[in-house]
Image (cartoon, helix red, strand yellow):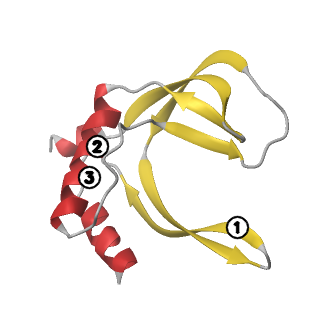
Amino acid sequence: NEIEKVKNVLKDINYPSFTYKTTNLEMLRDIAILKVDLNNDLQNIYDKIYDMLSKEGFSLNKRKYFPHITLIRNCDEKLHMDFSITQKVESIVLYSSEHIDGKLTYIPRFIKKFKDSFELNR
């Protein structure tokens, strides 16, 4: 089962919580997204998960990593707003996307909580 393989990969991740910054609301085709500034922590966790999933036999997309948060799909408006918000990342949530009653629904399947820096140094 692929979900179980991904859960096992995420269980093996040992990473401290970290922060990221969103800098604006923009459109990606017909999708409204919050753009996330790529920092070393995001790149490191992405690389670690990518490598571990590859070793598990997953065929992964080789596109450049583009961190973002999807807000609205099939958006008719052309939205844009500049701002800066810093958030703390404390976990990774694995979702499956399923069509339920004709609607795309995201279902949380696993949560991997990050360790606080203090806990890692014990």
Kindly state the secondary structure of the residue where label 3 is placed: helix
- For label 1, the crowd category at 10 Å Cα-Cα, with few meaning under 14, some 14 to 19 and many 20 or more, is few
Say whether residue 30 is visible.
yes
**Residue 14 appears in the picture as rendered:** no
Check the image and report above or below for 17 versus 97: above
Along the line of sight, which residue is nearer the eye, 82 or 13?
A: 82
Residue drawn at (35%, 25%), measured in percent from left and top?
39
Quadrant containing the C terminus in the rendered view:
top left
Question: Taking 49 as reference, is 112 left or right?
Answer: right
Spatial CA distance of label 2 from label 1 is 27 Å
Q: CA distance from mark 3 to mark 2?
A: 8 Å
Query: Badge 3, how many Cα within 10 Å: few under 14, some, many 20+?
Result: some
Residue at mark 1 = 104
Comparing marks 2 and 1, which lies closer to the viewer? Answer: 1
Q: CA distance from mark 1 to mark 3?
A: 25 Å
Q: Residues within 10 Å of mark 2 (few under 14, many from 20)?
A: some
Q: Nearer the viewer, residue 108 or 120?
A: 108
Q: Which residue is mark 2?
A: 45
Q: Are marks 3 and 2 in contact (CB under 8 Å)?
A: no
Dot 1 amino acid type: Leu
Where residue 34 sits, quadrant-wise, is top right
Task: Indicate which disc residue 50 carries.
Answer: 3
In what quadrant of the picture does the N terminus appear?
A: bottom left
Q: Amino acid at mark 2?
A: Ile
Q: Quadrant of residue 47?
A: top left
- Residue 16, position as x, y percentages in the image: 28, 41
- For numbered disc 1, what is the local secondary structure? strand
Secondary structure under badge 2? helix
Would you say 76 lies left or right of 111 here? Answer: right
